[in-house]
């Protein structure tokens, strides 16, 4: 069924009202004369785009249109993701001998990040080693340095800094620096069979001295131990109560080097006059000339004075059979 003539005008007027609404005005609508806008014909079959000689087009009624626009919010600018936050670092030891132990570090990062650590010698800005830890989740990050450079060679003894970079998902990078770390190549080798201590810096011998170690009941532990603390002066207090066969009165010394946190030290022993083989062989109350120590390494005062000045935290005490 074809639409009526009045229906045809309604269609044309509605289309023109929409055009006016988009232009933001009210206008009188007239039928288009473009052939491409032809509508269905009336009884004679003519369209509004009919050729010359057709009936003239009827005037279009006027209409007022009101346009209501709905605002489209602008696309928000992405909020920049802040750089990760790095916590203070914890180190296993501030100075290590890499021939015996690694330097372990841990810290936390507040968000997932790509983490690298540059290890830089004191007085330089050129790293000798870069540890690429890759992408790390938020939380605790751990790393170890073996004292070697990027070429796999042991670095020279000295001070170092750790420069940590953490790059977050948004590309922002946080940097934290940790200073006063160190590498040493010093060690003391203590022979239980010889009751002797020899100190080395790398392959260079520093001194050798006779010592007295623990007796058979309280032996000095074997192994490689880093010096953990240095004390001057120091007083030993018995962990055993009075009446125990191992009890001793408070005993002051001039120098003490802690090498195991169970309570083992390298220290001078003013109560002792004999050192060397046999001085730890007898059972009895430790502390006498031939009954050994409670497990510590007793050293003559002159040698201990030199060792205390020479040794650094991290110097290895290597106790061998």
Image: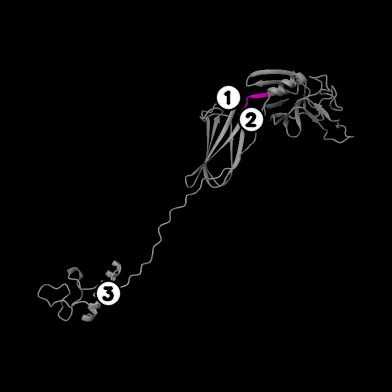
**SS at mark 1 in the image:** loop
The crowding category of the residue bearing disc 2, from other C-alpha atoms within 10 Å (few below 14, some 14 to 19, many at least 20), is many
* Residue bounds of the magenta highlight: 182-187
Most extreme residue toward the right is 243
Q: Identify the residue at image location x=58%, y=30%.
A: 160
Where is residue 87 drawn, in percent x and y? 59, 42
The crowding category of the residue bearing disc 1, from other C-alpha atoms within 10 Å (few below 14, some 14 to 19, many at least 20), is some
45 shown above or below 129: below
Q: Which of 298 and 77 is in front in this view?
A: 77
Where is residue 296 drawn, in percent x and y? 77, 28
Q: Indicate which disc, 1 or 2, sits on the residue closer to the N terminus.
A: 2
Q: Which of 267 and 175 is in front in this view?
A: 175
Which residue does the numbered mark 3 point to in the structure image?
14
Q: Is residue 309 magenta?
A: no
Which residue does the numbered mark 2 point to in the structure image?
95
- Secondary structure character of the magenta stretch overall: strand
Can you say which quadrant of the picture contains the C terminus?
A: top right
Occupied quadrant, residue 62: bottom left
Occupied quadrant, residue 210: top right
Q: Which mark is residue 156?
A: 1
Q: Identify the residue at image location x=65%, y=24%.
A: 186
Where is residue 313 drawn, in percent x and y? 67, 29
The crowding category of the residue bearing disc 3, from other C-alpha atoms within 10 Å (few below 14, some 14 to 19, many at least 20), is some
């Amino acid at each position: 069924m074809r639409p009526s003539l009045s229906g045809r005008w309604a269609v044309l007027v509605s289309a023109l009202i929409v055009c006016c609404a988009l232009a933001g005005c009210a206008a009188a609508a007239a039928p288009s004369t473009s052939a491409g806008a032809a509508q269905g014909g009336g009884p004679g079959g003519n369209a509004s785009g009919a050729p010359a000689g057709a009936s003239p087009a009827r005037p279009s009624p006027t209409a007022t249109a009101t346009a209501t626009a709905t605002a489209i919010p602008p696309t928000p600018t992405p909020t920049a993701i802040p750089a990760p936050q790095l916590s203070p670092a914890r180190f296993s030891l501030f100075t290590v001998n890499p021939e015996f132990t690694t330097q372990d570090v841990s810290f936390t990062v507040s968000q997932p990040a790509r983490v690298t650590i540059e290890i830089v010698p004191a007085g330089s800005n050129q790293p000798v080693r870069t540890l690429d830890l890759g992408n790390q989740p938020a939380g605790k990050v751990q790393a170890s340095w073996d004292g070697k450079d990027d070429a796999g060679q042991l670095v020279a003894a000295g001070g170092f800094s750790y420069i940590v970079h953490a790059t977050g998902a948004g590309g922002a990078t946080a940097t934290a620096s940790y200073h006063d770390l160190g590498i040493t190549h010093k060690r003391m080798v203590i022979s239980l069979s010889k009751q002797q201590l020899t100190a080395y810096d790398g392959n260079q011998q520093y001194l050798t001295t006779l010592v007295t170690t623990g007796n058979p009941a309280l032996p000095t532990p074997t192994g490689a131990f880093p010096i953990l603390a240095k004390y001057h002066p120091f007083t030993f207090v018995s962990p055993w109560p009075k009446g125990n066969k191992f009890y001793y009165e408070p005993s002051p010394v001039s120098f003490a080097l802690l090498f195991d946190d169970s309570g083992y030290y390298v220290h001078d022993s003013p109560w002792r006059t004999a050192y060397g083989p046999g001085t730890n062989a007898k059972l009895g109350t430790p502390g006498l000339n031939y009954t050994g120590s409670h497990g510590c390494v007793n050293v003559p005062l002159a040698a201990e004075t030199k060792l205390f000045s020479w040794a650094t935290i991290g110097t290895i005490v290597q106790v061998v059979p």
